[in-house]
Image (tube, rainbow, N blue to C red):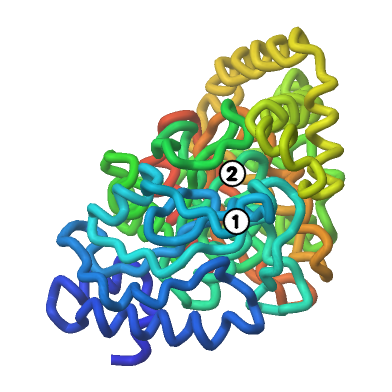
Protein backbone atom coordinates (compact mmCIF):
# COMPACT_ATOMS: atom_id res chain seq x y z
CA UNK A 1 0.00 0.00 0.00
CA UNK A 2 1.16 3.55 -0.70
CA UNK A 3 1.52 5.94 2.24
CA UNK A 4 -1.53 5.33 4.51
CA UNK A 5 -1.38 8.96 5.66
CA UNK A 6 -2.70 9.96 2.23
CA UNK A 7 -5.96 8.03 2.71
CA UNK A 8 -9.21 9.76 3.52
CA UNK A 9 -10.85 8.67 6.77
CA UNK A 10 -13.61 6.68 5.08
CA UNK A 11 -11.13 4.89 2.80
CA UNK A 12 -8.84 4.14 5.74
CA UNK A 13 -11.80 2.81 7.72
CA UNK A 14 -12.67 0.40 4.88
CA UNK A 15 -9.06 -0.78 4.69
CA UNK A 16 -8.96 -1.31 8.45
CA UNK A 17 -12.22 -3.28 8.45
CA UNK A 18 -10.95 -5.44 5.58
CA UNK A 19 -7.70 -6.20 7.40
CA UNK A 20 -5.57 -4.69 4.63
CA UNK A 21 -4.34 -2.01 7.05
CA UNK A 22 -3.83 -2.07 10.78
CA UNK A 23 -4.23 0.89 13.15
CA UNK A 24 -0.53 0.96 14.10
CA UNK A 25 0.52 1.35 10.44
CA UNK A 26 -1.91 4.19 9.89
CA UNK A 27 -0.96 5.99 13.09
CA UNK A 28 2.76 5.61 12.48
CA UNK A 29 2.37 7.03 8.94
CA UNK A 30 0.47 10.04 10.26
CA UNK A 31 2.95 10.57 13.10
CA UNK A 32 5.82 10.48 10.61
CA UNK A 33 4.12 13.20 8.57
CA UNK A 34 3.32 15.21 11.68
CA UNK A 35 6.87 15.03 12.99
CA UNK A 36 8.31 16.01 9.61
CA UNK A 37 5.96 18.96 9.01
CA UNK A 38 5.77 20.35 12.54
CA UNK A 39 9.01 22.41 12.51
CA UNK A 40 7.93 24.36 9.43
CA UNK A 41 4.16 24.50 9.83
CA UNK A 42 3.68 24.55 13.64
CA UNK A 43 0.44 22.59 13.44
CA UNK A 44 0.49 21.18 16.97
CA UNK A 45 0.27 22.81 20.36
CA UNK A 46 1.01 19.29 21.68
CA UNK A 47 1.94 16.20 19.67
CA UNK A 48 1.30 13.08 21.75
CA UNK A 49 4.31 10.72 21.82
CA UNK A 50 2.25 8.06 23.62
CA UNK A 51 -0.52 7.79 21.03
CA UNK A 52 1.04 4.71 19.32
CA UNK A 53 0.77 2.79 22.59
CA UNK A 54 -2.96 3.34 22.98
CA UNK A 55 -5.09 0.53 21.56
CA UNK A 56 -8.17 2.05 19.89
CA UNK A 57 -11.61 0.88 20.90
CA UNK A 58 -13.88 -0.82 18.35
CA UNK A 59 -16.38 1.47 16.69
CA UNK A 60 -17.08 3.54 13.56
CA UNK A 61 -13.86 5.56 14.04
CA UNK A 62 -11.69 2.58 14.99
CA UNK A 63 -8.00 3.32 14.52
CA UNK A 64 -8.47 6.69 12.81
CA UNK A 65 -6.07 9.45 13.98
CA UNK A 66 -7.79 12.65 15.04
CA UNK A 67 -6.47 16.18 15.55
CA UNK A 68 -8.20 18.13 18.34
CA UNK A 69 -8.23 21.92 18.47
CA UNK A 70 -6.68 23.17 21.68
CA UNK A 71 -9.91 24.65 23.04
CA UNK A 72 -11.25 21.16 23.84
CA UNK A 73 -10.33 19.72 27.22
CA UNK A 74 -8.26 16.53 27.11
CA UNK A 75 -7.51 14.55 30.24
CA UNK A 76 -4.22 13.09 28.94
CA UNK A 77 -2.79 16.15 27.18
CA UNK A 78 -2.27 19.80 28.14
CA UNK A 79 -4.98 22.26 27.12
CA UNK A 80 -3.97 25.92 26.98
CA UNK A 81 -6.79 27.45 24.85
CA UNK A 82 -4.16 29.34 22.83
CA UNK A 83 -3.31 31.58 25.81
CA UNK A 84 -0.23 31.95 28.03
CA UNK A 85 -2.62 32.25 30.96
CA UNK A 86 -3.38 28.52 30.74
CA UNK A 87 0.06 27.23 29.75
CA UNK A 88 0.60 23.77 31.26
CA UNK A 89 -3.05 23.33 32.26
CA UNK A 90 -4.07 19.67 32.59
CA UNK A 91 -7.85 19.10 32.66
CA UNK A 92 -9.20 16.18 34.65
CA UNK A 93 -11.65 15.11 31.94
CA UNK A 94 -12.12 15.04 28.19
CA UNK A 95 -14.57 17.35 26.50
CA UNK A 96 -17.72 15.49 25.48
CA UNK A 97 -16.80 15.54 21.78
CA UNK A 98 -13.35 14.11 22.54
CA UNK A 99 -14.81 11.44 24.84
CA UNK A 100 -17.28 10.35 22.17
CA UNK A 101 -14.53 10.27 19.54
CA UNK A 102 -12.36 8.03 21.71
CA UNK A 103 -15.33 5.80 22.59
CA UNK A 104 -15.95 5.36 18.85
CA UNK A 105 -12.35 4.23 18.34
CA UNK A 106 -10.55 7.40 17.24
CA UNK A 107 -6.96 7.98 18.41
CA UNK A 108 -6.19 11.57 19.41
CA UNK A 109 -2.79 12.24 17.87
CA UNK A 110 -2.39 15.68 19.42
CA UNK A 111 -3.77 19.13 20.17
CA UNK A 112 -3.82 21.55 17.25
CA UNK A 113 -2.95 25.23 17.43
CA UNK A 114 -5.80 27.67 17.96
CA UNK A 115 -5.87 31.42 18.02
CA UNK A 116 -6.12 32.93 21.51
CA UNK A 117 -9.38 31.59 23.02
CA UNK A 118 -10.53 30.85 19.44
CA UNK A 119 -10.72 34.57 18.75
CA UNK A 120 -8.49 36.51 16.34
CA UNK A 121 -4.96 36.76 17.76
CA UNK A 122 -3.01 34.31 15.55
CA UNK A 123 -1.00 31.33 16.64
CA UNK A 124 2.20 30.19 14.89
CA UNK A 125 0.65 27.82 12.29
CA UNK A 126 1.56 28.29 8.60
CA UNK A 127 -0.37 27.35 5.47
CA UNK A 128 0.90 24.02 4.04
CA UNK A 129 0.48 25.27 0.45
CA UNK A 130 2.64 28.33 1.10
CA UNK A 131 4.12 28.83 4.57
CA UNK A 132 4.34 32.57 3.92
CA UNK A 133 0.55 32.69 4.15
CA UNK A 134 -2.00 32.25 6.93
CA UNK A 135 -3.88 28.96 7.22
CA UNK A 136 -6.88 30.90 8.49
CA UNK A 137 -8.30 30.68 11.97
CA UNK A 138 -9.23 30.20 14.61
CA UNK A 139 -8.96 26.46 13.88
CA UNK A 140 -5.56 27.00 12.28
CA UNK A 141 -3.77 23.78 13.20
CA UNK A 142 -6.77 21.55 12.47
CA UNK A 143 -7.15 22.83 8.90
CA UNK A 144 -3.41 22.84 8.20
CA UNK A 145 -2.94 19.37 9.71
CA UNK A 146 -5.59 17.80 7.48
CA UNK A 147 -4.10 19.52 4.43
CA UNK A 148 -0.59 18.31 5.38
CA UNK A 149 -1.82 14.70 5.88
CA UNK A 150 -0.90 14.67 9.58
CA UNK A 151 -4.33 13.18 10.36
CA UNK A 152 -7.35 12.38 8.19
CA UNK A 153 -9.77 14.56 10.13
CA UNK A 154 -9.89 17.02 13.00
CA UNK A 155 -12.13 18.93 15.38
CA UNK A 156 -12.58 22.69 15.15
CA UNK A 157 -15.01 25.35 16.30
CA UNK A 158 -16.72 28.27 14.61
CA UNK A 159 -18.03 31.44 16.21
CA UNK A 160 -17.67 33.60 13.10
CA UNK A 161 -15.75 31.77 10.34
CA UNK A 162 -13.27 29.52 12.12
CA UNK A 163 -14.06 26.27 10.29
CA UNK A 164 -15.21 27.35 6.84
CA UNK A 165 -12.54 29.99 6.15
CA UNK A 166 -9.43 27.96 7.15
CA UNK A 167 -10.79 24.95 5.26
CA UNK A 168 -11.03 27.10 2.14
CA UNK A 169 -7.57 28.59 2.66
CA UNK A 170 -6.00 25.15 3.15
CA UNK A 171 -7.89 23.39 0.35
CA UNK A 172 -9.77 20.88 2.51
CA UNK A 173 -13.42 20.21 3.35
CA UNK A 174 -14.89 21.98 6.37
CA UNK A 175 -18.30 21.30 7.92
CA UNK A 176 -20.02 23.53 10.45
CA UNK A 177 -23.17 21.65 11.46
CA UNK A 178 -26.41 23.22 12.59
CA UNK A 179 -25.98 24.90 15.95
CA UNK A 180 -25.74 22.48 18.91
CA UNK A 181 -25.48 19.35 16.76
CA UNK A 182 -22.36 18.31 18.70
CA UNK A 183 -22.39 18.75 22.47
CA UNK A 184 -20.11 21.56 23.74
CA UNK A 185 -19.43 20.30 27.29
CA UNK A 186 -15.72 20.68 28.03
CA UNK A 187 -15.19 23.23 25.27
CA UNK A 188 -13.76 26.59 26.35
CA UNK A 189 -16.67 28.90 25.53
CA UNK A 190 -16.33 32.18 23.68
CA UNK A 191 -19.85 33.19 22.65
CA UNK A 192 -22.51 30.87 24.03
CA UNK A 193 -25.20 31.58 21.43
CA UNK A 194 -22.80 31.25 18.46
CA UNK A 195 -20.06 28.70 19.27
CA UNK A 196 -20.47 25.60 17.09
CA UNK A 197 -18.28 22.49 16.95
CA UNK A 198 -17.27 21.61 13.40
CA UNK A 199 -14.95 19.23 11.60
CA UNK A 200 -12.25 19.19 8.93
CA UNK A 201 -11.43 16.38 6.51
CA UNK A 202 -10.35 15.68 2.95
CA UNK A 203 -13.78 14.52 1.79
CA UNK A 204 -17.40 15.36 2.50
CA UNK A 205 -18.04 11.74 3.48
CA UNK A 206 -15.31 11.98 6.13
CA UNK A 207 -17.03 15.03 7.62
CA UNK A 208 -20.34 13.19 7.71
CA UNK A 209 -18.71 10.21 9.44
CA UNK A 210 -17.02 12.25 12.16
CA UNK A 211 -19.79 14.78 12.83
CA UNK A 212 -22.49 12.12 12.71
CA UNK A 213 -20.63 9.91 15.16
CA UNK A 214 -20.02 12.76 17.61
CA UNK A 215 -23.53 14.16 17.25
CA UNK A 216 -25.22 10.78 17.59
CA UNK A 217 -27.11 11.10 14.33
CA UNK A 218 -27.05 9.47 10.91
CA UNK A 219 -25.74 12.00 8.41
CA UNK A 220 -25.94 9.54 5.56
CA UNK A 221 -23.47 8.67 2.84
CA UNK A 222 -22.84 11.83 0.81
CA UNK A 223 -21.10 9.78 -1.87
CA UNK A 224 -24.35 8.00 -2.76
CA UNK A 225 -25.63 9.61 -5.95
CA UNK A 226 -28.92 11.49 -5.35
CA UNK A 227 -31.99 10.80 -7.46
CA UNK A 228 -31.96 14.31 -8.93
CA UNK A 229 -29.71 17.35 -9.27
CA UNK A 230 -30.02 20.18 -6.74
CA UNK A 231 -31.81 23.50 -7.00
CA UNK A 232 -29.11 26.01 -6.17
CA UNK A 233 -29.40 29.66 -5.22
CA UNK A 234 -26.27 31.63 -6.06
CA UNK A 235 -26.05 34.01 -3.10
CA UNK A 236 -23.21 36.50 -3.22
CA UNK A 237 -24.47 37.82 0.17
CA UNK A 238 -24.27 41.37 1.55
CA UNK A 239 -20.52 40.84 1.96
CA UNK A 240 -19.90 40.64 -1.79
CA UNK A 241 -17.94 43.96 -1.96
CA UNK A 242 -15.19 42.18 0.04
CA UNK A 243 -14.71 39.52 -2.66
CA UNK A 244 -11.30 39.55 -4.32
CA UNK A 245 -10.93 39.33 -8.14
CA UNK A 246 -10.33 35.57 -8.02
CA UNK A 247 -13.61 35.02 -6.16
CA UNK A 248 -15.47 37.34 -8.55
CA UNK A 249 -14.10 35.32 -11.47
CA UNK A 250 -14.96 32.02 -9.77
CA UNK A 251 -18.57 33.03 -9.20
CA UNK A 252 -18.92 34.33 -12.74
CA UNK A 253 -17.96 30.86 -13.96
CA UNK A 254 -19.99 28.81 -11.48
CA UNK A 255 -23.48 28.96 -13.06
CA UNK A 256 -22.37 27.45 -16.37
CA UNK A 257 -20.43 24.66 -14.65
CA UNK A 258 -23.32 23.78 -12.35
CA UNK A 259 -25.97 23.95 -15.07
CA UNK A 260 -23.81 21.77 -17.31
CA UNK A 261 -23.79 19.19 -14.51
CA UNK A 262 -27.59 19.30 -14.35
CA UNK A 263 -28.37 21.72 -11.52
CA UNK A 264 -31.08 24.32 -11.54
CA UNK A 265 -29.36 27.63 -10.75
CA UNK A 266 -30.78 31.03 -9.95
CA UNK A 267 -29.57 34.16 -8.24
CA UNK A 268 -30.99 34.43 -4.73
CA UNK A 269 -30.21 37.48 -2.60
CA UNK A 270 -31.03 37.61 1.09
CA UNK A 271 -33.86 40.00 2.00
CA UNK A 272 -32.71 43.43 3.15
CA UNK A 273 -33.57 42.68 6.79
CA UNK A 274 -30.56 40.32 6.96
CA UNK A 275 -28.05 43.16 6.39
CA UNK A 276 -28.31 44.02 10.10
CA UNK A 277 -26.28 40.89 10.87
CA UNK A 278 -23.14 42.91 10.12
CA UNK A 279 -23.85 44.89 13.28
CA UNK A 280 -25.48 42.23 15.42
CA UNK A 281 -22.89 39.47 15.10
CA UNK A 282 -19.93 41.42 16.56
CA UNK A 283 -22.15 42.94 19.25
CA UNK A 284 -23.30 39.51 20.44
CA UNK A 285 -19.90 37.87 20.04
CA UNK A 286 -17.99 40.56 21.95
CA UNK A 287 -20.57 40.86 24.72
CA UNK A 288 -20.79 37.11 25.25
CA UNK A 289 -17.00 36.73 25.07
CA UNK A 290 -16.53 39.38 27.77
CA UNK A 291 -18.79 37.39 30.06
CA UNK A 292 -17.26 34.00 29.17
CA UNK A 293 -13.69 35.20 29.77
CA UNK A 294 -14.47 36.99 33.02
CA UNK A 295 -11.87 35.12 35.10
CA UNK A 296 -9.08 35.82 32.61
CA UNK A 297 -10.17 39.44 32.29
CA UNK A 298 -10.28 40.05 36.04
CA UNK A 299 -7.22 38.06 37.15
CA UNK A 300 -4.79 38.10 34.18
CA UNK A 301 -5.60 41.16 32.06
CA UNK A 302 -1.92 41.80 31.22
CA UNK A 303 -1.67 38.38 29.55
CA UNK A 304 -4.50 39.04 27.12
CA UNK A 305 -3.47 40.24 23.67
CA UNK A 306 -4.22 43.94 23.07
CA UNK A 307 -6.66 43.04 20.29
CA UNK A 308 -8.65 40.69 22.52
CA UNK A 309 -8.61 43.13 25.44
CA UNK A 310 -10.02 45.80 23.14
CA UNK A 311 -12.81 43.51 21.96
CA UNK A 312 -13.68 42.46 25.49
CA UNK A 313 -13.81 46.10 26.56
CA UNK A 314 -16.23 46.78 23.72
CA UNK A 315 -18.31 43.82 24.85
CA UNK A 316 -18.45 45.07 28.42
CA UNK A 317 -19.47 48.52 27.22
CA UNK A 318 -22.46 47.18 25.31
CA UNK A 319 -25.69 47.79 27.26
CA UNK A 320 -27.39 44.62 28.44
CA UNK A 321 -30.56 45.77 26.68
CA UNK A 322 -28.68 45.96 23.37
CA UNK A 323 -27.43 42.39 23.75
CA UNK A 324 -30.89 40.99 24.50
CA UNK A 325 -32.40 43.02 21.68
CA UNK A 326 -29.76 41.69 19.28
CA UNK A 327 -30.45 38.12 20.36
CA UNK A 328 -34.17 38.66 19.78
CA UNK A 329 -33.53 40.01 16.29
CA UNK A 330 -31.30 37.03 15.52
CA UNK A 331 -34.10 34.68 16.57
CA UNK A 332 -36.47 36.51 14.23
CA UNK A 333 -34.04 36.26 11.31
CA UNK A 334 -33.51 32.54 11.94
CA UNK A 335 -37.26 32.06 11.78
CA UNK A 336 -37.38 34.06 8.54
CA UNK A 337 -34.62 32.15 6.76
CA UNK A 338 -36.77 29.25 5.43
CA UNK A 339 -38.72 31.77 3.36
CA UNK A 340 -35.46 33.20 2.01
CA UNK A 341 -34.44 29.78 0.68
CA UNK A 342 -37.93 28.66 -0.45
CA UNK A 343 -37.89 26.57 -3.60
CA UNK A 344 -34.18 25.80 -3.28
CA UNK A 345 -32.16 22.98 -1.79
CA UNK A 346 -29.07 25.05 -0.92
CA UNK A 347 -27.41 28.40 -1.27
CA UNK A 348 -23.95 28.64 -2.80
CA UNK A 349 -21.85 31.53 -1.50
CA UNK A 350 -18.15 32.41 -1.06
CA UNK A 351 -16.27 30.60 1.70
CA UNK A 352 -13.70 33.40 2.05
CA UNK A 353 -12.87 36.67 0.28
CA UNK A 354 -10.24 34.90 -1.86
CA UNK A 355 -6.90 33.15 -1.51
CA UNK A 356 -5.20 32.95 1.88
CA UNK A 357 -3.48 36.31 2.45
CA UNK A 358 0.28 36.69 2.77
CA UNK A 359 1.60 37.20 6.28
CA UNK A 360 0.73 35.88 9.73
CA UNK A 361 -0.45 38.94 11.63
CA UNK A 362 -4.07 38.03 10.79
CA UNK A 363 -6.00 34.85 10.01
CA UNK A 364 -8.10 36.54 7.34
CA UNK A 365 -11.54 38.08 7.20
CA UNK A 366 -14.64 36.07 8.29
CA UNK A 367 -16.94 38.43 6.41
CA UNK A 368 -18.46 35.63 4.30
CA UNK A 369 -19.12 33.40 7.31
CA UNK A 370 -20.62 35.34 10.22
CA UNK A 371 -24.03 35.60 8.50
CA UNK A 372 -24.55 31.85 8.39
CA UNK A 373 -23.05 31.26 11.84
CA UNK A 374 -25.43 33.83 13.31
CA UNK A 375 -28.33 32.03 11.65
CA UNK A 376 -27.23 28.63 13.12
CA UNK A 377 -27.22 27.03 9.65
CA UNK A 378 -25.26 24.00 8.37
CA UNK A 379 -22.38 25.06 6.11
CA UNK A 380 -19.88 23.05 4.09
CA UNK A 381 -16.90 24.35 2.17
CA UNK A 382 -15.44 22.30 -0.68
CA UNK A 383 -12.40 23.00 -2.86
CA UNK A 384 -13.19 24.87 -6.08
CA UNK A 385 -9.89 25.35 -7.87
CA UNK A 386 -6.98 27.69 -7.36
CA UNK A 387 -6.39 31.42 -7.44
CA UNK A 388 -3.77 33.41 -9.37
CA UNK A 389 -1.03 32.50 -6.86
CA UNK A 390 -1.81 28.79 -6.96
CA UNK A 391 -3.56 28.86 -3.59
CA UNK A 392 -6.80 26.95 -2.94
CA UNK A 393 -10.21 28.53 -3.38
CA UNK A 394 -13.38 27.16 -1.79
CA UNK A 395 -17.12 27.58 -2.17
CA UNK A 396 -19.59 27.41 0.70
CA UNK A 397 -22.79 25.37 0.60
CA UNK A 398 -25.47 26.55 3.03
CA UNK A 399 -28.64 24.65 3.92
CA UNK A 400 -31.69 25.27 6.08
CA UNK A 401 -31.41 24.61 9.81
CA UNK A 402 -31.27 20.92 10.77
CA UNK A 403 -30.99 19.74 7.14
CA UNK A 404 -27.38 18.67 7.70
CA UNK A 405 -27.73 15.30 6.00
CA UNK A 406 -29.13 16.85 2.82
CA UNK A 407 -26.68 19.75 2.93
CA UNK A 408 -23.74 17.32 3.04
CA UNK A 409 -25.18 15.30 0.15
CA UNK A 410 -25.59 18.44 -1.96
CA UNK A 411 -22.10 19.61 -1.00
CA UNK A 412 -20.70 16.35 -2.39
CA UNK A 413 -22.72 16.91 -5.57
CA UNK A 414 -21.28 20.41 -5.94
CA UNK A 415 -17.75 19.16 -5.24
CA UNK A 416 -18.08 16.58 -8.01
CA UNK A 417 -19.50 19.15 -10.42
CA UNK A 418 -16.55 21.47 -9.83
CA UNK A 419 -13.79 18.86 -10.19
Q: Which residue is mark 1?
A: 139
Q: As rendered, which of 260 and 118 lies closer to the eye?
A: 118
Near mark 1 (Cα within 10 A), the count class, few <14, some 14-19 or many ≥20, is many
Q: Position of residue 240 (x, y in %)?
A: 80, 43
Is any atom of residue 27 visible in this view?
A: yes
Residue 198, numbered circle: none
Q: Residue at x 54, y 50 (%)?
A: 71
Q: Position of residue 12 (x, y in %)?
A: 28, 73
Q: Are marks 1 and 2 in contact (CB under 8 Å)?
A: yes
Q: Which residue is mark 2?
A: 158
Q: Is residue 261 above or below residue 14?
A: above
Residue 76 is drawn in which quadrant?
bottom left
> Horizontal placement of 76 versus 268: left or right?
left
Q: Secondary structure at mark 1?
A: loop
Near mark 2 (Cα within 10 A), the count class, few <14, some 14-19 or many ≥20, is many
Is any atom of residue 268 visible in this view?
A: no
Q: Secondary structure at mark 2?
A: strand
Amino acid sequence: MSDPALLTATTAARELRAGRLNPAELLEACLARATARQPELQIFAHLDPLSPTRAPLPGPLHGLPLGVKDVFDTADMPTAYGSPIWQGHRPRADAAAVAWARAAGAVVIGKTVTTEFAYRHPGPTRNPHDPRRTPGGSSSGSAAGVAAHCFPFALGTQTAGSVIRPAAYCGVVGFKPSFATINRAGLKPLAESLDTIGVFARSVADCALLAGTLGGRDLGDPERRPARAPRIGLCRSPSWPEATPETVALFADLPERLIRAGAGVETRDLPGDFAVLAELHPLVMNAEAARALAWELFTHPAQLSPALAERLAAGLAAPTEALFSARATLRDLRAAFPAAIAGLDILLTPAAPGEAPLGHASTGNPVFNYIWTSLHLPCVTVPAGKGPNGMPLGVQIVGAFDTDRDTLAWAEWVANALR
